[in-house]
Amino acid sequence: MTEARQLLSGDEAVALAALHAGVRLGTGYPGTPSTEILETFDRLGGRAQWSPNEKVALEVALGVAFAGARTLVTMKHVGLNVAADPLFTAAYTDLAGGLVVVSADDPGMASSQNEQDNRHYARAAGVPTLEPADSQQAYDYTRLAFAISERWRIPVLLRMTTRVCHSKTVVHPRASETGAEPTFVRDIPARVMIPAYAKPAHERLRAKLAEIAAWNEAEGPFALDAGDAALGIVSTGVSAVHAREAAPQARHLSFGMTYPLPLERIRAFAAGVERLVVIEEGDPVVCEALRAAGLPAEGRPERYRFGELDVARVRRILAGDDTPEPVPPKGKPPELCQGCAHRLVFEALRDLDCIVSGDIGCYTLGVLPPFSAMDTCVCMGASIGVGLGLRHVLPEEQARRVVSVIGDSTFVHSGLTGLAEMVYNPPPTGHLVMILDNGTTAMTGLQEHPGTGRALDHSPTNQVCYEALARALGIADVLVVDMTYKGLSLKDLIAERLARSELSVIITRQPCVLAAPKIRLYDKAAAATCAATPEPGAEPRMAGG
């Protein structure tokens, strides 16, 4: 039975489509603007879980697909960098169940360290890619992606952008599907990618892509609006919405599958217009592909490569206006919350004039006044490796000021290997790593992770112990600091470790001020559940009498 229409964000639409497509397991790592997909999927009754990082999430999903079940993997654009290793080889394998990878790109860097365009991954990895323009297409293309994945036994990339993820439009859902029961069928040549099997697998991949390209030409999703032949606009994703509003009189062609491109369809469109302009957000991926195919496509001036497009910017592009754009008004800069334990950490690092190798999370705000206590920030987990590099080559006086700062969720995501590197290749002056444990993945909306002891739905699960991990790796000096202790002198503790020529880990621990009330509720619910559950072997107790 078809559900009534709903007003949904793009993220919510993907989640609903996954539920209706019969997805058995959703995996991912939280990151704006993708986070709400798995949270919504869980809320709707789907089975979802946060993984330590995106690579692990995709590997778990591969296992699900090899078992013949449908699976969804979600991440923001930089997360695909982490998952790229399994993605490239997964494209060679033959999947039994549908596997859809959501890459939520962030043009304009609303909450990211770069604005990479992950359409490049489609061509590089050889995976078909769909780009929705609104929530209805997010729903439809998610379900289409599963159909394509299973027809050609290949992973499919669903490229979302911030505007599509977070904007709400009307969605008309379709009837739900029930997938086949999972089962494992051995197929060694299709799934064990040693060179003897990978070489023919690469040839099969290229044959699949040729078939998908032919399908895209004949049946792929597209929209053609007849208009004045003086101007023909080719567009994808949310840019198609802006283009239609900016130039309603023009002739428009937009398409949902952007790799492989429907080149012959576009060629026919180009032959019927006097001027061909490509409107796309991010890098000139489509424009360059059309030019390489010999089509006279106009792109955008370089300035429009940066940030999101909107109707006004598209009008400027069509008019050839390359003059400076109005400077947007400055907003209030973000800051660490009042009462946040991270503030004490960065005050101490600032006062000690430390060279701080930082990481990705809300604590990255320690770079801003009044602290100005962060000197590098590259990617998840880089704080430890970068800090070690600084320690290895700086003069001793400077080397002893270097501290690596990393959050609890980020440490599990990418910090473990950095800690192993520290033990394996210790700098002559030693090194200090500070793990700031606030009991949540704060920056993306207070999600759980392996260090919280709670699953995606906040129910109790096993908990990773950072201090035990550090000691197990061979670090003798591991100190856990309760940041609520009034007699604490964090500055003295840091200064003492910096003066030593040994490896040290300081774990600062205090719940995030925003998450603390919720954590207390989760703990209370868990305690109540434990109290109501009899111990194994215990006689059940009856009320009354």
Image (cartoon, grey):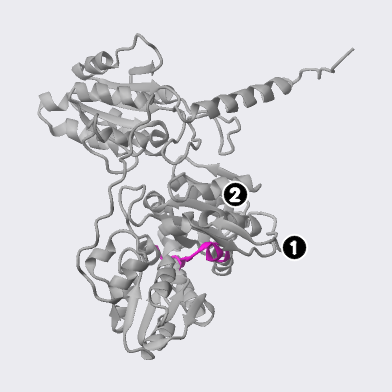
| Residue 310 image position (x, y, % from top left) | 36, 64
Quadrant for the N terminus, please. Answer: bottom right
| Residue 80 image position (x, y, % from top left) | 40, 53
Which residue type carries mark 1?
A: Met
Choose between 256 and 184: the one closer to the eye: 256
Which residue type carries mark 2?
A: Phe
| Residue 123 image position (x, y, % from top left) | 37, 67
Q: Which residue is mark 1?
A: 1
Q: Which residue is mark 2?
A: 41
Local secondary structure at mark 1: loop
Which one is earlier in the sequence, the residue at label 2 or at label 1? 1
Quarter of the figure with residue 309 = bottom left
Is residue 158 visible from the viewing direction of this image? yes
| Residue 22 image position (x, y, % from top left) | 65, 57
- Span of residues in magenta: 125-140
Local secondary structure at mark 2: helix
Residue at position x 47%, y 61% in the image: 157
Instruction: For marks 2 and 1, give the CA distance.
Output: 19 Å
Asked if residue 136 is among those painted magenta in the image, a careful observer would answer yes
